Amino acid sequence: MPGVPPQRFTYLGPEGTFAEQALLTLPAARNGVREPSATVPEALDAVRSGAVGAALVPLENSVEGAVGVTLDELAYGAPLLITRELLLQVRFGLFGRPGTKLESVRTVASHPHGLAQVRAWMRKHLPDAEQRSTSSTSDAAVAVARGDFDAAACAAVAGERQRLELLADDIGDSSTAVTRFVLVTRPGRPAERTGDDLTSLVAFIAHDRAGALLEVLTEFAVRGLNLTRIESRPTKERLGRYCFLLDCSGHIADDRVGEAVMGLRRICADVRFLGSYPAAEPSPPYTRRPGTSDADFADAAGWLRQIRDGATDRG
Ligand SMILES: O=C(O)C(=O)C[C@]1(C(=O)O)C=C[C@@H](O)C=C1
């Protein structure tokens, strides 16, 4: 559109990461300005400072689980808002400098989540190679091109950009590995409700009574809300203290979600709203508790209104 400045995005870089590939699936990002960040905290700080409008960062992987640094930033860093989730199938190749023979590889570099996803392949094919962590999979490719390591476990685009040679293809232990990324902005109005949404929250439970987590879960269960993820993270105060990152079906604009969140607010030491955003995949079907359909909620709200208004016919 003429006159509208392009949107600015950042992502876990350098160019060639899975994060960049996921970001490029968004038309606004393809047509916008994209600046890589060296780490997840750096990407999120660029959002907080207003240097960019949004950052795409990895949240979890279907093989290796949560990306702790992202969860900690969202739970404990200056508040941010998740406005989208993106799922990307991740496929790893082993790349070395031209002329490298697989048998001569002594060091393999990748992001820790990348190394974890090629563990079985490494044990079988390169059991004696040393594994080295880098800040991202494409950072590993850059380091290999520089001569720091013999090979990188990374995406094909990263290997090709660094003019590396493919030594082994599809080395991931799971052929269906998926990474979930989130697009994060500064706090503001949540993304529009689509009817198939997810809501992310952090519950800081009260640690001084038994059953505090059960009380949190009950707020969702009684309203027929499906929890799609629950993850604990240490509060870092001392052993045994955790907060819980929760994803549930529904949008904060939905009555049942709003009521559950109000319930958490009453029973938790603190609650952080992380965002409501469209589900990247249709939510899996689940059986709703009786009395928790949209119509049930609307009926109950109308009935209460009538009572409060003093209507004689109370249905
Ligand atoms: O290094 C990358 O390419 C990233 O986008 C990061 C990341 C992650 O943190 O999980 C993303 C996908 C892969 O599973 C491995 C690494």
Image (cartoon, rainbow, N blue to C red):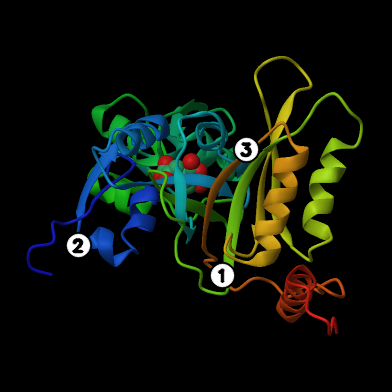
Return the residue nearer the eye: 185 or 284: 185
- The residue most toward the top is 238
- Give the SS element for disc 2: loop
Q: Looking at the picture, does residue 3 appear above or below residue 185?
A: below
- Image quarter (top left, top right, bottom left or bottom right) of the N terminus: bottom left
Residue bearing mark 3: 123
Mark yes or no: residue 249 visible. Answer: yes
Instruction: Give the amino acid at mark 3.
Output: Arg
Horizontal and vertical percent position of residue 41: 41, 30
**Looking at the image, is mark 1 or mark 2 earlier in the sequence?**
2
Q: Looking at the picture, does residue 274 appear above or below residue 37?
A: below
Instruction: Give the amino acid at mark 2.
Output: Asn
- Give the SS element for disc 3: helix
Q: Is 298 positioned to the left or the right of 60 in the image?
A: right
Horizontal and vertical percent position of residue 69: 52, 32
Checking the image for residue 31, the label placed there is 2
Horizontal and vertical percent position of residue 115: 53, 37
Instruction: Name the residue at 69% across, 50% down.
Output: 262
CA gap, disc 3 and disc 2: 42 Å
- Give the SS element for disc 1: loop
Instruction: Name the residue at 48% across, 45% down.
Output: 58
Checking the image for residue 7, the label placed there is none
The answer as to whether callout 3 falls within 8 Å of ligand 1 is: no
Residue bearing mark 1: 281
Q: Residue 270 appears in which quarter of the rendering?
A: top right
Return the residue nearer the eye: 195 or 263: 263
Horizontal and vertical percent position of residue 28: 26, 63
Q: Are marks 1 and 2 in contact (CB under 8 Å)?
A: no
Instruction: Give the amino acid at mark 1.
Output: Glu
Q: Are marks 3 and 2 in contact (CB under 8 Å)?
A: no
Mark yes or no: residue 98 visible. Answer: no
CA gap, disc 1 and disc 2: 24 Å
